[in-house]
Image (tube, helix red, strand yellow):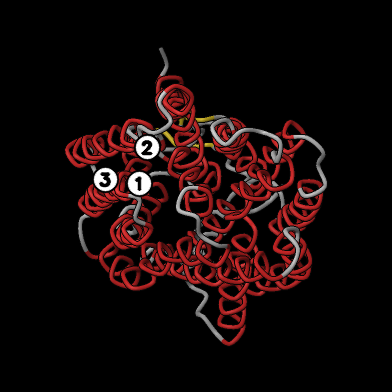
């Protein structure tokens, strides 16, 4: 078998290091618990603990609030210490958080549930910036959105699938036949806690964080091979050249006033994007219950909610990598327009559905757009700087978490004081107004990005 076929088959993407797939498997194991945890956060506060919309907003804000405190330190450590050690800390933190969630449900204590949420935000923040940085280090810049989507979204999607097949039957059977057995009903949390610990330890032992794409590329040059984004690996004598990237990095352009205008505008756009996204997302399950499930019994409602969430969570993660490939091939401004308009349309359709089936179908497409938007922004941030890539991801996450603190509080206030559709409608209009501002930010910043990408 030729070298190019072997390497393409091992990477799963057109251009990554050979160990890329083995590195990103950790997000599969992490993803096992995500769908169950997401369901718990949005359901139990109101319907298990008896809280209000404001209570749900506060609980949803605790995790990003904790990350605001630790993210500057994490961003610094990502560029100056072992990335895989930080990933291990994040995995251990998720294990402790899941155990606290389970205990809070067993003793029926909303405050303990809040402590678990805060702890998760405090420690799991150590996971994502170094992990994103490793993905960027081990992938070709012209495939960056696709690599980020595959490394997080696609692998988590597979984890969602496996986790749902494990957690939904346990939850459903206990809810129907032993509805008072809370420890057993929420026991998947303990299973996922254990798996996270094992996966983090395995990641720490196996990942070579010193093998970057640049070093891998140089090793191929030494073997008389060069890389082509369209053809994989070609002989050095081949006349084909890469059409998707500049021949060299844009390192000689010094930042000036336009750079700072573009960068600050982009940061503000990320903040508002995060706020508009989290104004309504914590209340999706509550909206489903209040508007489409009033005639169902209490024991069946949470099962229906999980089943509605299941395809949306799984399919969106798996499809995001495909859309990531699309966004790597079209102009960033066009990506912003497509994401913004489709998001607004889908939110509007979601709140005017007639059945849980309609709701589930619309939710699938909405989650696909939301995931794609996240990876698109991460790809933009990854190109600003190579030397300070960890700080870029850390800043991106810090701003995003700030928005996730503000958004749920606004959404909870709207939910309690106005109509149940209010958080959704408010998000639609703010999101549409954000489109030209995001385009302005990217256009101003683009000439100063270290990694330049041409669009054919």
Residue 105 — which label? 1
Q: Is residue 286 left or right of residue 167?
A: right
Image position of 397 with respect to 240: above or below: below
Bin the neighbour count of mark 3 within 10 Å (Cα to Cα): few under 14, some 14-19, many 20 and up: some
Q: Which residue corresponds to mark 2? A: 24
Q: Is residue 393 left or right of residue 74?
A: right
Residue 18 in view in this figure: no
Residue 93 — which label? none
Distance Cα–Cα, label 2 vs label 3 = 24 Å
The one nearer the camera, 304 or 178, is 178
The percent position of residue 90, horizontal first and vertical second, equals 28, 52
Residue beneath the point at 66% across and 47% down:
327
Mark positioned earlier in the residue sequence (3 or 1):
3
Mark positioned earlier in the residue sequence (2 or 1):
2
Distance Cα–Cα, label 2 vs label 1 = 32 Å
The quarter of the displayed image where residue 123 is located: bottom left
The percent position of residue 391, horizontal first and vertical second, equals 38, 68
Q: Which residue corresponds to mark 3? A: 99
Task: Give the structural element (helix, strand or loop) at label 2.
Answer: helix
Q: Nearer the viewer, mark 3 or mark 1?
A: 1
Q: Is residue 268 left or right of residue 61?
A: right
Residue beneath the point at 52% across and 50% down:
42
């Amino acid at each position: 078998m030729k070298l190019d076929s072997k390497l393409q088959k091992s990477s799963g993407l057109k251009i990554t290091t050979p160990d890329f797939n083995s590195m990103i498997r950790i997000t599969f194991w992490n993803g096992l618990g995500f769908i169950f945890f997401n369901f718990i956060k949005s359901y139990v506060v109101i319907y298990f603990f008896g809280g209000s919309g404001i209570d749900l907003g506060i609980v949803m804000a605790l995790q990003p609030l904790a990350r605001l405190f630790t993210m500057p330190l994490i961003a610094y450590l990502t560029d100056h210490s072992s990335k895989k050690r930080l990933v291990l800390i994040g995995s251990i933190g998720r294990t402790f958080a899941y155990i606290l969630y389970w205990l809070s449900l067993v003793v029926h204590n909303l405050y303990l549930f809040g402590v678990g949420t805060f702890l998760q935000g405090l420690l799991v923040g150590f996971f994502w910036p170094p992990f994103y940085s490793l993905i960027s280090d081990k992938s070709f810049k012209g495939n960056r959105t696709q690599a980020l989507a595959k490394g997080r979204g696609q692998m988590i999607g597979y984890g969602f699938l496996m986790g749902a097949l494990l957690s939904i039957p346990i939850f459903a059977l206990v809810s129907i036949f032993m509805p008072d057995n809370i420890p057993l009903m929420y026991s998947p949390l303990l299973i996922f806690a254990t798996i996270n610990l094992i996966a983090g330890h395995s990641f720490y032992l196996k990942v070579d964080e010193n093998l970057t794409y640049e070093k891998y590329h140089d090793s191929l040059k030494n073997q008389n091979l060069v890389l082509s984004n369209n053809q994989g690996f070609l002989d050095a004598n081949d006349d084909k050249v890469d059409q998707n990237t500049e021949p060299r990095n844009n390192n000689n352009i010094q930042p000036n006033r336009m750079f700072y205008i573009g960068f600050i505008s982009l940061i503000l756009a990320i903040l508002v994007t995060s706020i508009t996204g989290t104004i309504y997302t914590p209340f999706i399950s509550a909206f489903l219950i209040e508007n489409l499930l009033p005639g169902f019994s209490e024991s069946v409602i949470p099962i229906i909610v999980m089943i509605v969430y299941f395809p949306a969570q799984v399919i969106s993660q798996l499809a995001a990598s495909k859309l990531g490939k699309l966004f790597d091939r079209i102009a960033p401004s066009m990506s912003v327009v497509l994401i913004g308009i489709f998001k607004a349309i889908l939110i509007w359709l979601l709140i005017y559905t007639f059945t849980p089936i309609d709701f589930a179908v619309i939710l699938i497409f909405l989650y696909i757009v939301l995931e794609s938007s996240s990876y698109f922004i991460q790809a933009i941030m990854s190109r600003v700087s190579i030397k300070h890539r960890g700080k870029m991801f850390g800043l991106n996450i810090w701003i995003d978490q700030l928005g996730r603190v503000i958004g749920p509080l606004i959404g909870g206030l709207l939910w309690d004081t106005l109509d149940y559709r209010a958080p959704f409608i408010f998000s639609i209009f703010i999101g549409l107004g954000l489109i030209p501002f995001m385009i302005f930010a990217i256009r101003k910043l683009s000439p100063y990005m270290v990694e330049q990408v041409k669009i054919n």
